[in-house]
Each structure stands twice: as structure tokens, then as C-alpha cells.
Amino acid sequence: MPLIDRDDCALVIIDVQTDFYPPKRLDVDRQRFHDMVRRIAWITSVADRLGIPVVVTEEDPDTSGHTVPEIREVLPAKAVTLPKNAFAVWDNPDIAAAIEATGRTTMVLVGIETDICVAHSAIQLHHAGKRVVVVDDAAYSPGQAHDRGLRRLAGRDIETLSTKELFYDWVRTIQDADAFHDTHADLAVPPGVRL
């Protein structure tokens, strides 16, 4: 597969909501989840500054809350946030229409949960003819479910890469990377990422 072309990408943020993991969920590694949120917020900011469209989903927002503030605060003005009832984004007509409206054919997926909503979305989008890329350190499921989800994607030949790899695919050259950093010095590199 060729490198990820930022001019053909849309970023899809799946279900990173305030109450998705309530305090009674003792299996959730809160630090890993928080670090993932910070990476998604950074990817979202980078996407905004590179003109990459963003689609956000919220599963059952009446129960699971809305997108966490760290991400919501950096969403591009044109980002679309939609409720999600089917686990796969593509199986929700309004979300599928929003994805199609971007005019992009490469879908970059981040969010939760790696083994269910992210995996279902990746598989259905891939089946619909989209190029799908899951950012593995910007996706999360508790315990071993994260690794199981990534193995399932690998078995379907769906690409995974890291936040760092995505950034360098998007900027491509030393000159463009340096120019991005110089122009956007306010974007602190998120935890677990070394550029």
C-alpha cells in the first residue's frame, strides 16, 4: 500500500465519550485511556491544520455522554458529530452520508473500543471499498481486548500504524515537518509519541 495521502484522508473519531467508562468499570486503565485521549486530541489538531475533514461519532449519548472535552475543544469548525446506534460507523446511514460527503476514500480511525466499534467500523468501511487505517496507539479497549481487536484487523488485512507514523505520512518531508512544527509550536507532542 502507498503512504497515506492527507489529501484523500478523513479522520473518524469513534465514541470517545465522557461516560463510556463509568467509575465502576475497574478493568479500565485510566492512564492508558487518558494518554489515548491526548493523542486523539493532537491528531485532531493536526488534521484541522492540514485541512483533513473530521467525523465524530457518539454511541448512545444519553447514556454514555458526549465527546470528551479534550477532543471537543480542538474539533475543526466543520467537523460533524453524529449519534451512532449500530457498532460500525458505516452501518449508520447519517454517519455513512457524512463520510461520503468528505469526498475522501481513506478513512483514518481512532477511538473506542478497538475490538468492537473500531473493528466493526474498519471491516465495514473496508468492505465498502474504502482504504482504512487504524491508529493503534489512538484506539483503546480494556485488558486484552485491545490486542484481540488489532489481531482481528490484521487478519482482515486492515492497516494499523502509530500516531507518529500517521504524522510523518501526512507531512512526508523534513522540510514540511519542520515547517509544521515551526508554524504550530503550540501543539505539544502527546504522551508516548517522539517526533
Image (cartoon, rainbow, N blue to C red):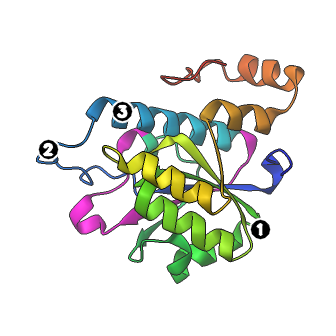
Magenta part of the protein: which range?
50-70
Query: Was residue 51 drawn as part of the magenta stretch in this picture?
Result: yes
Q: Is residue 66 above or below residue 46?
A: below
Kindly tell me whether residue 79 is visible in this rendering: no
Q: List x then y, in percent, for residue 115.
A: 43, 58
Sort mark 3 into few (<14), some (14-19) or many (20+) by Cα contacts within 10 Å: some
What's the distance in space between the residues labelled 1 and 2, CA to CA?
A: 39 Å
CB atoms at circles 3 and 1 under 8 Å apart?
Answer: no
Q: Which residue is mark 2?
A: 23
Residue 88 screen position, x and y as percent: 49, 71
User: Based on the displayed image, in which of its 4 quarters is residue 193 positioned?
Assistant: top right
Amino acid type, mark 1? Gly
The residue that mark 3 highlights is 32
Q: Is residue 134 left or right of residue 84?
A: right
How crowded pointer 2 is (Cα within 10 Å; few <14, some 14-19, many 20+) is rated as: few
Q: Residue at x 59, y 24 (%)?
A: 187
